[in-house]
Image: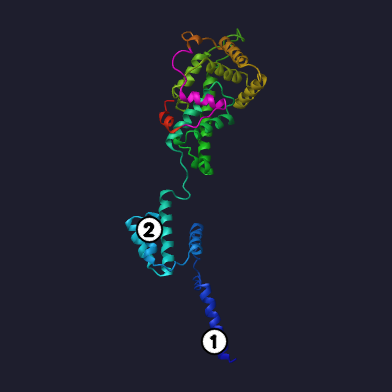
């Protein structure tokens, strides 16, 4: 074999290899950084290139018309598809990539990839309402993690408020809602503890076991806390005061009065509640009710009684609000997924 034929064979092999491997990649200019497309763009281009197939032998115009009808494209998009069908193969590939990149750009303008999720205003209001009701609920089994769980369960059962399945399934978005609930609890617990602490008064040196000086009676304490006078953070949404609620406030006040210096108040409250549940486990509900009534009777001795309002008058008047009922049911393990009908009937006045 002559050198010439060998060189020609080498050229043929080189030409064959070049054709199969595609056009060579031009080297990056010296001193210039290499192009670095985003991972999303690279994945998009790779998917299009790998999934691209040569068209069938049938007429391109007929194929584009058939696809347009199947996808129910409008007239402008149908014309664009017919135009693209007449392009050479490489132009079609580039055309598809260009359209996809344009679509991604528009999508990012609507909701940027790294945009921070913002809790909707309606959901914020509902969180405020239900956190508040969880704190004043006499059936509350805990005021820390348990309260968060109860409120989140209720919010999930009302997707129209903003905590949709899509939000719950997105870890970042759901965490934003959980953080909002947790911060709301922290804020309202702080104000509730401050209100109770303010009501304690001081020990009467002449009668240490008797009525405390400058103390607030229990009915006034609960009324102030539920009406939240002068405290936007304890804003209430029309709750019904009950004797059970007043007894629970008497319990909360007793724990604070007996709390050691530098003690963690809300942890102490939850520990006390756990002990009470264990103590009355398996016993009639009336036994626990009598226990809390005894705490309320002691409170009346230490902090005094209201001169104008009486416990016997508390149970009359309006019924429990929807939010109060939902929270009490959730505390008892009952959470009902709201229908589209009663979703619209639930208002912020709950």
Does the rendering let one see residue 291?
Answer: yes
Location of residue 56 by image quarter? bottom left
Task: Name the residue beneath numbered marker 1.
Answer: 8
**Residue toward you, 273 or 197:** 273
- Residue at disc 1, secondary structure: helix
Location of residue 93 by image quarter? bottom left
Q: Residue furthest left?
A: 75
- Residue at x-position 55% and y-position 90%: 4
Does the rendering let one see residue 260?
Answer: no
**Residue toward you, 7 or 226:** 7
Earlier sequence position, callout 1 versus callout 2: 1
Task: Name the residue beneath numbered marker 2.
Answer: 68
- Residue at x-position 53% and y-position 16%: 246
Q: Is residue 325 magenta?
A: yes
Q: What x and y, as percent, mark residue 270?
A: 61, 25
Q: Is residue 243 above or below residue 343?
A: above
- Residue at disc 2, secondary structure: helix
**Residue toward you, 152 or 343:** 343
Q: Answer with left or right where residue 56 lies relative to residue 256.
A: left
**Residue toward you, 28 or 275:** 275
User: Dot 1: few (<14), some (14–19), or many (≥20) neighbours within 10 Å?
Assistant: few
Q: What x and y, as percent, mark residue 337?
A: 50, 32
Prevailing SS of the magenta stretch: loop
Q: Which residues lie in the magenta part?
A: 314-338
Q: Residue furthest bottom?
A: 2
Q: Quadrant for the C terminus, please.
A: top left
Query: In 3D space, how far apart are the residues under numbered discs 1 and 2 (Cα atoms)?
Result: 49 Å
Q: What x and y, as percent, mark residue 115?
A: 46, 47
1 or 2: mark nearer the eye:
2
């Amino acid at each position: 074999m002559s050198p010439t034929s060998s060189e020609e064979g080498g050229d043929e092999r080189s030409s064959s290899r070049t054709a199969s491997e595609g056009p060579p990649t031009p080297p990056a200019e010296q001193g210039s950084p290499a192009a670095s497309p985003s991972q999303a763009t690279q994945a998009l281009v790779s998917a299009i290139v790998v999934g691209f197939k040569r068209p069938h032998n049938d007429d391109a115009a007929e194929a584009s018309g058939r696809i347009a009808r199947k996808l129910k494209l409008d007239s402008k998009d149908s014309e664009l598809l017919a135009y693209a069908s007449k392009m050479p193969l490489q132009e079609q590939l580039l055309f598809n990539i260009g359209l996809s990149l344009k679509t991604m750009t528009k999508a990012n303008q609507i909701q940027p990839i790294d945009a921070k999720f913002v809790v909707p205003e309606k959901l914020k209001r509902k969180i405020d309402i239900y956190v508040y009701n969880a704190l004043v609920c006499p059936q509350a089994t805990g005021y820390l993690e348990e309260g968060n769980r109860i409120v989140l369960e209720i919010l999930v059962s009302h997707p129209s408020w903003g905590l949709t399945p899509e939000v719950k399934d997105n870890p970042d978005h759901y965490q934003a809602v959980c953080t909002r609930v947790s911060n709301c609890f922290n804020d309202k617990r702080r104000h509730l503890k401050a209100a109770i602490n303010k009501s304690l008064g001081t020990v009467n040196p002449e009668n240490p076991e008797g009525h405390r000086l400058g103390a607030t009676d229990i009915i006034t304490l609960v009324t102030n806390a539920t009406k939240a006078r002068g405290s936007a953070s304890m804003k209430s949404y029309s709750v019904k005061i009950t004797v059970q609620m007043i007894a629970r406030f008497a319990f909360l006040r007793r724990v604070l009065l007996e709390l050691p210096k530098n003690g963690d108040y809300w942890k102490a409250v939850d520990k006390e509640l756990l002990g009470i549940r264990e103590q009355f486990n398996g016993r009639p509900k009336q036994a626990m009710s009598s226990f809390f009534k005894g705490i309320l009777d002691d409170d009346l001795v230490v902090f005094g009684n209201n001169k104008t309002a009486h416990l016997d008058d508390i149970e009359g008047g309006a019924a429990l609000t929807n939010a109060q009922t939902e929270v009490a049911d959730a505390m008892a393990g009952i959470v009902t997924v709201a229908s589209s009908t009663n979703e619209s009937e639930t208002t912020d006045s709950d």
